[in-house]
Image: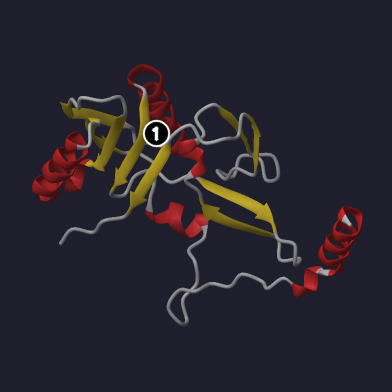
């Protein structure tokens, strides 16, 4: 009976053709399209990386979290950051709050690696316009390459990231070694008026 069931499942799975899989489509506002790496990098040039440790709030349990906020918006969000830190501390987390300026994806990842190795962070919250890592894949439908921003670059701190398809273009296209996330990342762009 098990062999018949396995044969039925395999037959069903193998009968699904690639043409039956729906193509993902852009779901942004009508008439818009996702920004490409080249468009994004033209408006976000890399500058020298710097950081300031603003505060360490100690929790009473294991588990450290880093809050990385864009320096230019930190003062506008001071009360919200204090509340967030208080909430995390009440849950037992030690919170490291940093203000960040500039940098590349590689310098930000290196910074996170140091926090992971020296402070045992389990995650980081990105607030504001921080460096963005991009990944590209060959388009299966013959349209060259597709690129997109990627957070896994900051989560997997001991894997190896490669740029082999279009070497030196600033976009990764391979990931080897230990490829599992080591920390979590929560991020979002916040615009302050």
Taking the spot 64% from the left edge, 44% from the top edge, the residue there is 173
Figure check: 69 above or below 5: above
Q: Is residue 105 above or below residue 146?
A: above
Measuring from the top left, give residue 120's x and y in whole percent.
Answer: 36, 22
Residue, far top: 118
Question: Foreground: 11 or 21?
Answer: 11
Image quadrant for the N terminus? bottom right
Q: Quadrant of residue 18?
A: bottom right
- Number of marks drawn: 1
Where residue 187 appears, as percent x and y from the top left, is 35, 49
Q: Which residue is mark 1?
A: 108
Q: Is residue 180 above or below residue 146?
A: above
Q: Give the image location of residue 99, x and y in percent.
A: 22, 36
In the drawing, does residue 18 fall left or right of residue 76? right
Name which quarter of the figure residue 158 lies in.
top right
**Residue 133 x %, y %:** 48, 44
């Amino acid at each position: 009976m098990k062999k018949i069931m396995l044969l039925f499942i395999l037959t069903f799975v193998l009968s699904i053709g690639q043409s039956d899989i729906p193509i993902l489509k852009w779901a942004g506002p009508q008439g818009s399209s996702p920004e490409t790496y080249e468009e994004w990098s033209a408006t976000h040039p890399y500058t020298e990386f710097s950081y300031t440790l603003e505060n360490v709030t100690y929790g009473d349990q294991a588990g450290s979290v880093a809050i990385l906020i864009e320096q230019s918006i930190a003062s506008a969000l001071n009360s919200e950051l204090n509340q967030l830190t208080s909430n995390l501390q009440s849950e037992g987390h030690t919170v490291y709050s940093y203000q960040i300026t500039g940098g590349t994806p590689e310098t930000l990842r290196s910074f996170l690696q140091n926090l992971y190795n020296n402070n045992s962070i389990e995650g980081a919250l990105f607030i504001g316009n921080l460096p963005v890592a991009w990944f590209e894949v060959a388009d299966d439908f013959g349209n060259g390459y597709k690129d997109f921003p990627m957070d896994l670059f900051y989560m997997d701190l001991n894997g190896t990231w490669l740029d082999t398809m279009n070497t030196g273009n600033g976009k990764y296209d391979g990931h080897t070694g230990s490829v599992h996330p080591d920390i979590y990342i929560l991020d979002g762009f916040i615009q302050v008026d």
